[in-house]
Image (spheres, helix red, strand yellow):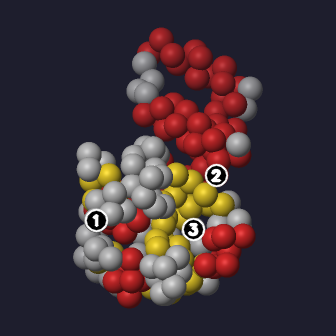
Amino acid sequence: MRFSLLLASLLLASAAQAAPLQDRSDDMERMLVDKGLIGQLQQVRQSVVDRTSDLVVTAIGFLGVPYRRGGNTAESGFDCSGFVRAMYNQTVGHLLPRRAEEQAAATEKIDRSELKPGDLVFFNTMRRTFSHVGIYVGEGKFIHSPRTGAQVRVEDMNGSYWQRRFDGARRVLSQEPDNVATVK
């Protein structure tokens, strides 16, 4: 529920910021400023931006896409690493390796307590390290393409199944002109 409210707030705040103010809306804007509502809206927007990322918002748009082993497009379906790879490529322009264990090797290890939306979370679901990957969305939840017969969905990492299989968290680094910077 909180995640849905967070996403709705993000969309409303983005729409409010993206809409150009016209001359006839100046009176409305003055009234909102006088009542302190503009400041509140900006606080809400900043809070939402701090807790999510474009990557997460894009990934949420793929909820319901079916799982397909080896799949890497919305049209054909996704497997877990294909989903993560497609989201990073489409949103950030960063092409990750194809397999989950390769994605783990190509990213920076972080502590679970350092997780931010957009970070990768890995699980041992096939009796081998890093056999499953998802994207952390915040509040202990991640989005992933789970298995045959299922669809892209959001799940709680603190559920007993995922908690027992958690292998670690990683942060994707992308090359910036001057330096290597963390994708937020």
The mark found on residue 17 in the picture is none
The mark found on residue 116 in the picture is 3
Rendered-image quadrant of the N terminus: top right
Which residue position is annotated with label 1?
70
Of the two numbered discs 2 and 1 in the rendering, the one whose residue sits closer to the viewer: 1
Are circles 3 and 2 on residues that touch, CB within 8 Å? no
Residue lying at 66% horizontally and 24% vertically, measured from the top left: 32
Is residue 109 in sight in this rendering? yes
> Does dot 2 land on a helix, a strand or a loop?
helix
Earlier residue among tags 3 and 1: 1
Q: Position of residue 43 (x, y in %)?
A: 66, 45
Residue lying at 43% horizontally and 28% vertically, measured from the top left: 19
Earlier residue among tags 3 and 2: 2
Q: Check disc 3 and give the amino acid type.
A: Lys
Is residue 88 in sight in this rendering? no
Neighbor class of circle 2 (other Cα within 10 Å; few <14, some 14-19, many 20+) is some
Q: CA distance from mark 3 to mark 2?
A: 13 Å
Which residue position is annotated with label 2?
47
Q: Position of residue 151 (x, y in %)?
A: 46, 50
Neighbor class of circle 3 (other Cα within 10 Å; few <14, some 14-19, many 20+) is many
Q: Check disc 1 and give the amino acid type.
A: Gly
